[in-house]
């Protein structure tokens, strides 16, 4: 069957995930193929209870999973995908065959299965799989389709159900005991714990000071060339047979932990340097060893994320976004893979390029193969490499910006993996002498000479430690032999201090998660993105810093759900899920064991734990008994005697406990961006000593209440102090009047008169000729006039108090300007959209920058930047927005039916012979329409009530790992 001809088979519909992928594949198939995107998942567990079909009630409605009937999931079509599903069904009606061409992994297989379930095709269905988007690969995939892999589908479904149960059961506990709108997840909570534990280590860390000597020794010879220098540096390593203490000899408490070592302080180091000034030194030993370094394996998902972070400064999410784009446009193979295997075609392409670019001397006799280090690696996939049977050099791709940089990284790594080892010599020289006071000292110097660079010519791996020496770095020592005399040109005492363990970066956290076998490598980017977006972690440079909020969350989870955030338990749970995927265990008994604590279980997760006495008696039991959780204790962390850090519902603060029991202590807010290890006793006292920002202004002459100016979390404001005993909660609660200061005002200079004017807003300006009231108000976007629903901006804040009715009417007499007075120039021009064939530009909108072709608008995503966005990315955002279809306003449907009824009645009334019947019908139609309208309004109210009741669940309990 030729993919480029229609043949007797008629039209074939090919469904992929993304519009960009569809566009690329369409170019490789003939006119007999329709290629359309599903735009990701079309069906999933419901996001809110309102999305659950009416026949489901109780826990099923809340969870979206029927835990009483073998954990059957309730799937619904995503609201924003309904228009796309309709389009796919329409295209399928015109087609004779259906090809499901989603990615060949668990997620892709699940998307394909959901498509088949929703579309219900009556034509032959084929599963089309490929690892790269090239013409040969696509046409080969069409010729050799397979069936859906139900085992992969079941594995993905089990993970989805597990994550839903974890997220929807544990998150509400956090809402009740810590703060609303928090989330917990099977992997995200463990990742957060790792970051918090590292910060705890930094907080407990005590630095130690130690000294040594650096000597510069001269051989007495004139250097013949750079390969044989006349002098070299060496470090003191021993005195009288005792090793000099270095950083690794000290514990976290700053105490020396290694026996038989000499700890030098500054005084001792300087005294020793003075005693060695006249010492005659000589070479005691020269040890030379062969040096050999083999190439690094080709990239898999996690190693690509790590290297892109080290070398390009990309976050894990950005790396995957760029890699996805390169894959969909046919530049690299599939980027979510655990495998380091290269196909025979790829090995041949890499070896050919080695010979072409570096010469035959750099090509090993036999191809190199790499075994995967990842347990349960998906070996069906290849490593991440340039696509095709001939690799394009970066210059040949036509790529630019981040796309070029990441492709170049992948290309260099792949080519280097098929090159010869780097070889050379490593040398260690020991130099000894005796001090003036009789002490025997020994210095050491290490060198490395690379005689053949091999793969290092093409690629050198980066390091997480900025001070680490890279593999291609040489250190040349002079050619000396044992017994050679040396003179010390310089002896320099050098002080050092031990450093706390480094915070995780995105790269090192990815490595840690993978080393601990927690979660799946393909999900790490989204996990890191989640813990940052949930404010559990923030970035300081490249470091991941835990917030005080995350300390409270992890504290609760460790004390009351110990196993759920235990590293071994989470890793063994991953093993169990892989065994289910391999068909070695069944999902329903395992889920019962996890949720209800029933049965023997299919895996070993239940036996893992952290030894805190907690048990896996079933998740449901754990989240039901919350009486033992003291919310205040969970969120309180002592700093010193009588001084405590607390995480409140509105953020963290320090509190100096009151000496009077039951009385609130002195409090001070903590800056949101303060790293926890920087909160010392001294800083806490400093924050408490600062003025609270509250300044008495005087008394309101009307109410008699005192007025004060304060500095709040959202800026300075004025407020009234209500009399003691005024109810603050319940039906009779009274709220104090407050008003934000104008931009021209400051907390230090605001007066009582200013406060009274601010609290007088909104001000009634007057009534227009029709009797409509016009008010002057201060809003989020500045001062404005309001008449009914019609608002008009004012030019400055003073107008709120000075504008007259005539001036206000003159403003309303002008045509209303939409947006700014004049259309702002585009921020960037991207070119012509291939679909609408209209010019695409980037504009600045009220809610941030967006791309538009004049018909469709699409907001830029979090990682898209105006300066770096490419035309292709702009077209992709617009295509995704078109695929989702316009937002429908359901509220306008009822009047439409009413109009139809009236129109039908009016048409009938035109016939004289049936006048009476028409009148009767018209009346009936009106009554029916009225009843329908009332019923619909009632239903709408009920739905709104349901949505309100469940919106918290939807917004606050994400169930992603």
Image: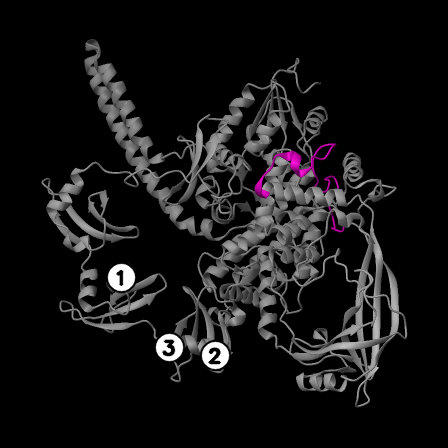
Number of marks present in the image shown: 3
Is 388 included in the stretch rendered in magenta? yes
183 on left or right of 237: left
- Whether residue 763 is visible here, answered yes or no, is yes
Residue 908 is situated, as x and y percent measured from the top left of the image, at: 24, 15
Dot 1 alpha-carbon crowd within 10 angstroms: few under 14, some 14 to 19, many 20 or more: many
- The answer to which of marks 1 and 2 sits earlier in the sequence is 2
Q: Which residues are magenta?
A: 373-402
Q: Which residue is mark 1?
A: 741
Q: In what quadrant of the picture does the N terminus appear? A: top right
| Eye-nearest disc, 1 or 3 | 1
Which residue is depicted at the point 22% across and 10% down?
911
Instruction: Check disc 1 and report its element: helix, strand or loop.
Output: loop
Residue labelled with disc 2: 682
Provide residue 625's location: percent of width, then percent of height: 52, 64
* Residue receiving disc 3: 664
Question: Contact, CB < 8 Å: mark 1 with mark 3?
Answer: no
Which SS class for mark 2? helix
Q: CA distance from mark 1 to mark 3?
A: 29 Å
Q: Nearer the viewer, mark 3 or mark 2?
A: 2
Furthest residue in direction bottom, as rendered: 437
Secondary element at tag 3: loop
Instruction: Kindly tell me whether residue 582 is visible in this rendering.
Output: no
Residue drawn at 25 percent across, 66 percent down: 719
* In the rendered image, the vertical position of residue 263 relative to residue 720, given as above or below: below
Give the percent coordinates (x, y) of residue 278: 78, 84
Q: Nearer the viewer, residue 488 or 951?
A: 488
Mark carried by residue 692: none
């Amino acid at each position: 069957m030729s993919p480029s001809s229609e043949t007797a088979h008629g039209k074939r519909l090919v469904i992929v995930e993304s519009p960009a992928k569809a566009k690329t594949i369409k170019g490789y198939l003939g006119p007999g193929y329709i290629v359309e995107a599903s735009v990701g998942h079309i069906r999933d567990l419901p996001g809110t209870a309102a999305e659950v079909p009416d026949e489901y009630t109780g826990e099923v409605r809340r969870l979206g999973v029927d835990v009483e009937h073998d954990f059957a999931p309730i799937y619904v079509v995503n609201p924003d995908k309904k228009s796309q599903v309709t389009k796919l069904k329409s295209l399928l009606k015109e087609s004779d065959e259906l090809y499901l061409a989603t990615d060949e992994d668990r997620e892709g297989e699940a998307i394909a299965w959901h498509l088949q379930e929703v579309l219900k095709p009556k034509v032959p269905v084929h599963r089309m799989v490929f690892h790269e988007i090239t013409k040969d690969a696509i046409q080969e995939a069409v010729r050799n389709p397979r069936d859906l892999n139900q085992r992969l589908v079941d594995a993905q479904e089990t993970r989805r159900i597990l994550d839903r149960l974890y997220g929807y059961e544990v998150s509400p506990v956090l809402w009740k005991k810590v703060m609303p709108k928090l989330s917990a997840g099977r992997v995200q909570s463990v990742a957060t714990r790792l970051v918090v534990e590292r910060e705890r280590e930094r907080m407990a860390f005590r630095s130690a000071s130690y000294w040594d000597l650096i000597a510069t020794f001269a051989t007495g010879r004139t250097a013949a060339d750079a390969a044989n220098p006349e002098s070299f540096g060496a470090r003191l390593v021993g005195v009288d047979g005792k090793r000099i203490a270095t950083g690794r000899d000290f514990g976290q408490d700053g105490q020396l932990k290694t026996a038989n070592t000499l700890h030098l302080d500054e005084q001792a180091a300087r005294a020793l340097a003075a005693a060695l000034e006249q010492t005659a030194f000589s070479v005691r030993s020269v040890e030379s060893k062969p040096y050999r370094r083999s190439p690094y394996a080709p990239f898999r998902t996690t190693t690509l994320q790590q290297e892109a972070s080290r070398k390009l400064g990309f976050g894990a999410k950005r790396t995957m976004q760029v890699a996805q784009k390169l894959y969909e446009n046919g530049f690299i193979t599939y980027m979510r893979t655990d495998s380091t295997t290269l196909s025979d075609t790829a090995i041949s392409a890499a070896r050919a390029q080695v010979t072409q670019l570096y010469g035959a001397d750099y090509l090993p006799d036999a191809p190199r193969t790499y075994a995967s280090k990842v347990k349960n690696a998906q070996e069906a996939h290849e490593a991440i490499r340039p696509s095709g049977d001939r690799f394009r050099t970066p210059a040949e791709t036509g790529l630019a910006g981040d796309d070029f940089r990441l492709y170049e990284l992948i290309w260099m790594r792949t080519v280097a993996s098929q090159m010869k080892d780097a070889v050379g010599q490593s040398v260690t020289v020991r130099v000894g002498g005796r001090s003036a006071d009789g002490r025997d000292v020994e210095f050491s110097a290490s060198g490395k000479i690379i005689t053949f660079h091999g793969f290092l010519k093409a690629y050198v791996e980066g390091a997480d430690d900025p001070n680490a020496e890279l593999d291609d770095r040489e250190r040349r020592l002079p050619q000396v032999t044992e017994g050679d005399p040396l003179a010390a040109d310089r002896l320099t005492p050098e002080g050092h201090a031990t450093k706390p363990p480094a915070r995780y970066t995105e790269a090192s956290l990815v490595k840690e998660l993978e080393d601990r076998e927690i979660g799946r490598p393909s999900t790490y980017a989204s996990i890191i993105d989640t813990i940052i977006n949930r404010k559990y972690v923030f970035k300081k440079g490249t470091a991941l810093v835990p917030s005080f909020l995350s300390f409270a969350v992890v504290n609760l989870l460790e004390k009351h759900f110990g196993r759920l955030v235990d590293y071994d338990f989470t890793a063994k749970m991953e093993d169990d899920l892989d065994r289910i995927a391999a068909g070695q265990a069944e999902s329903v008994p395992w889920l019962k064991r996890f949720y209800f604590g029933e049965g023997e279980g299919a895996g070993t997760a239940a036996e893992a734990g952290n030894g805190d006495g907690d048990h896996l008696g079933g998740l449901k039991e754990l989240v039901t008994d919350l009486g033992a959780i003291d919310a205040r204790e969970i969120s309180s962390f002592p700093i010193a005697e009588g001084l405590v850090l607390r995480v409140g519902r509105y953020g963290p603060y320090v509190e100096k406990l009151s000496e009077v029991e039951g009385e609130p202590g002195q409090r001070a807010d903590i800056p949101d961006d303060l790293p926890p290890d920087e909160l010392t006793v001294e800083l806490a006292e400093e924050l408490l000593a600062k003025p609270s920002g509250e300044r008495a202004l005087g008394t309101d002459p009307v109410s008699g209440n005192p007025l004060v100016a304060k500095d709040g979390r959202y800026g300075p404001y004025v407020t009234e102090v209500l009399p003691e005993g005024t109810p603050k909660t319940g039906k009779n609660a009274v709220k104090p009047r407050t008003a934000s200061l104008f931009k021209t005002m400051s907390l230090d200079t605001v007066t009582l008169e200013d406060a009274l004017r601010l609290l007088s807003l909104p001000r009634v300006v007057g009534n227009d000729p029709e009797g409509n009231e016009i008010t002057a108000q201060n809003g989020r976007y500045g001062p404005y006039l309001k008449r009914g629903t019609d608002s008009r901006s004012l030019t400055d804040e003073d107008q709120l108090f000075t504008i007259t009715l005539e001036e206000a009417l003159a403003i309303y007499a002008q045509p209303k300007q939409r947006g700014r007075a004049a259309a702002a120039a585009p921020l960037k021009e991207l070119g012509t959209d291939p679909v609408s064939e209209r010019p695409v530009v980037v504009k600045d909108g009220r809610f941030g920058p967006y791309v538009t072709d004049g018909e469709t608008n699409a907001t830029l995503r979090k990682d898209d930047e105006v300066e770096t966005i490419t035309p292709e990315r702009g077209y992709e955002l617009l295509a995704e927005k078109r695929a989702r279809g316009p937002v429908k306003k359901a509220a306008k449907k009822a009047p439409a039916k009413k109009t139809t009824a009236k129109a039908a009645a009016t048409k009938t009334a035109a016939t004289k012979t049936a006048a009476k019947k028409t009148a009767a019908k018209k009346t009936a139609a009106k009554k029916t329409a009225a009843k329908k309208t009332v019923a619909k309004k009632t239903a709408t109210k009920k739905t709104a009530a349901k949505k309100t009741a469940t919106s918290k669940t939807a917004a606050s309990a994400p169930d992603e790992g």
